[in-house]
Image (cartoon, grey):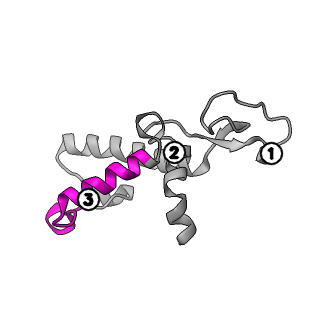
Amino acid sequence: PSLDIEEPIRLSECPEGTRRCVCRDMDGEEHAHMVSEVDLAVKKMVLEGAFALATQHKMGEVKPEEYGFRSLSFDEHSPSDDLSGTLDLIARLYQAAGGGDKAFTTYGLRRALAPAIRAG
């Protein structure tokens, strides 16, 4: 995961006067990068919470619920008994999102998850 909070947007969907980007994030499609309000909100919450939890842990009192986190029991919520199948699904999702170059970008995740989002 990156700390980047921008996402590529088709240039035709950007505000008038937005400068075109020449990177390959959208495989050559004309685009610009704009702040993703979702990325901004989520990453801000996660980082603030992580630093607060690290500070609390150092003082001996950890309350993850105060920061929107939940404790998770791996005994209760572990992957299915078919660990190999679970890892195969993760590997396929990683490749569909663009592998090492794009898997953790907003564009890569949107591309990989688009079929699931369309299906509801």
Per the model, the C-alpha gap separating discs 1 and 2 is 20 Å
Per the model, the C-alpha gap separating discs 3 and 2 is 20 Å
Whichever of callouts 3 and 2 sits on the residue coming sooner in the sequence is 3
Q: Secondary structure at mark 2?
A: helix
Left of 116 or right of it: where is 57?
left
Q: Mark 1 sits on what residue?
A: 12
- Is 51 magenta? The answer is no
Tag 3 near tag 2, CB within 8 Å? no
- Amino acid under disc 3: Thr
Q: Secondary structure at mark 3?
A: helix
Q: Residue at x 55, y 59 (%)?
A: 114
- Amino acid under disc 2: Gly
Left of 94 or right of it: where is 35?
right
The residue segment tinted magenta is 71-95
Q: Quadrant of the N terminus?
A: top left
Image coords of residue 11 (percent x, y): 77, 41
Left of 28 or right of it: where is 40?
left
Depth check, front residue: 47 or 66:
47
Q: Residue at x 47, y 36 (%)?
A: 3
